[in-house]
Image: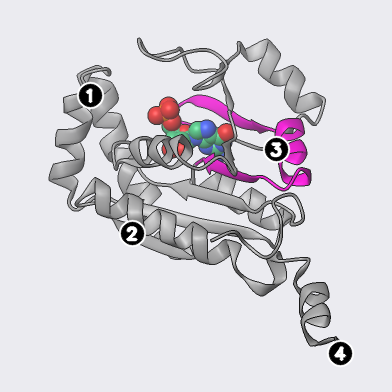
């Protein structure tokens, strides 16, 4: 059923998905984006090297340290943070343009970036995805076979630190079944879009509804 308020009549919302690496966040966000034209991904800039399947401009903007420094100096990031020895940042312009056009923006960022966004906006929806167990998390990281043993060990160490921030999120999901997790994320997004304060045309609609005919 179409919404009362046409797309574009509301300001888009900022939808943050955080999780330790390997908890299924990328699968969930890709599936969400694939069949929902009203949400767009914020593509981050990073100083980390691309993985084999990654495409510049789609997965990340891969930049060197000098370029990243320049972007920081230009205030080009909404937030940025050091993660696993590399820097990651959210370019400001694309996000603001999407929000102003009434599109929702999906952020795949860590707890540090989420805290920074929360300081700048009171209209953030924060979702944290937990793995069903640490053993399963390690199995998934090894299954990807994209990182060396030492990188995986480092990521397992960091996973516990990332998970320790779970209570800073509005919604916390356990990804023991990716389809269920995806449908839970879709439900959260659908409900958040219907929040009264996000439906900016609603007061006018109700006024019309009640006007003597
Ligand atoms: P990966 O290197 O596996 O792609 O990402 C490592 C971590 O960096 C993930 O937890 C991811 O959410 C986080 N990350 C990716 N982009 C950004 C960003 O722009 N800002 C912040 N704060 N974290 C990011």
Whether 125 is among the magenta residues is: no
Q: Which of pointers 1 and 4 lies earlier in the amino acid sequence?
A: 1
User: Mark 4 highlights which residue?
Assistant: 212
| Cα separation between marks 2 and 4 | 47 Å
| Cα separation between marks 3 and 2 | 25 Å
Q: Which of pointers 3 and 2 lies earlier in the amino acid sequence?
A: 3
In the rendered structure, find residue 144 and report the number of the disc placed on it: 1
| Cα separation between marks 1 and 4 | 63 Å
Whether residue 156 sits left or right of residue 39 in the image: it is left
Q: Would you call the spot at circle 1 few (<14 residues within 10 Å), some (14-19), or many (20 or more)?
A: few
Circle 1 — which element? helix
User: Mark 2 highlights which residue?
Assistant: 173
Span shown in magenta: 82-109
> Up-down: is 61 above or below 19?
above
Q: Quadrant of the C terminus?
A: bottom right
The residue closer to the viewer here, 89 or 176, is 176
Say which residue appears at 70% left-offset and 56% top-offset.
Answer: 119
In the rendered structure, find residue 68 and report the number of the disc placed on it: none
The residue closer to the viewer here, 181 or 103, is 103
Q: Would you call the spot at circle 2 few (<14 residues within 10 Å), some (14-19), or many (20 or more)?
A: some
Q: Nearer the viewer, mark 2 or mark 4?
A: 4
User: Mark 3 highlights which residue?
Assistant: 95
Q: Which of pointers 2 and 1 lies earlier in the amino acid sequence?
A: 1
Q: Which of pointers 1 and 3 lies earlier in the amino acid sequence?
A: 3
Q: Nearer the viewer, mark 4 or mark 3?
A: 4
Q: Would you call the spot at circle 4 few (<14 residues within 10 Å), some (14-19), or many (20 or more)?
A: few
| The quarter of the displayed image where residue 193 is located | bottom right
| Cα separation between marks 1 and 3 | 30 Å
Verify CB contact (< 8 Å) between mark 4 and mark 3: no
Say which residue appears at 71% left-offset and 66% top-offset.
Answer: 199
> Up-down: is 193 above or below 44?
below
């Amino acid at each position: 059923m179409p919404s009362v308020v046409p797309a574009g009549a509301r300001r888009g919302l900022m939808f943050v998905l955080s999780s330790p690496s390997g908890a299924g966040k990328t699968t969930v966000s890709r599936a969400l984006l694939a069949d929902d034209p009203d949400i767009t991904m914020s593509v981050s800039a990073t100083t980390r090297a691309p993985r084999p399947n990654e495409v510049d401009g789609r997965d990340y903007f891969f930049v060197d340290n000098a370029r990243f420094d320049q972007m920081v100096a230009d205030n080009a990031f909404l937030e940025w943070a050091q993660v696993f020895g590399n820097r990651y940042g959210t370019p400001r312009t694309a996000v603001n343009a999407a929000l102003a056009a009434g599109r929702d923006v999906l952020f795949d960022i860590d707890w540090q970036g989420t805290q920074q966004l929360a300081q700048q906006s009171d209209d953030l929806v924060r979702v944290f995805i937990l793995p069903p167990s640490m053993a399963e998390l390690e199995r998934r990281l090894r299954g990807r076979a994209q990182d060396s043993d030492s990188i995986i060990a480092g990521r397992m160490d960091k996973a516990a630190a990332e998970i320790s921030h779970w209570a800073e999120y509005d919604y916390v999901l356990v990804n023991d079944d990716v389809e269920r997790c995806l449908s839970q994320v879709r439900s959260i997004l659908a409900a958040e879009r219907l929040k009264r304060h996000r439906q900016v045309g609603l007061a006018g609609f109700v006024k019309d509804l009640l006007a003597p005919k």
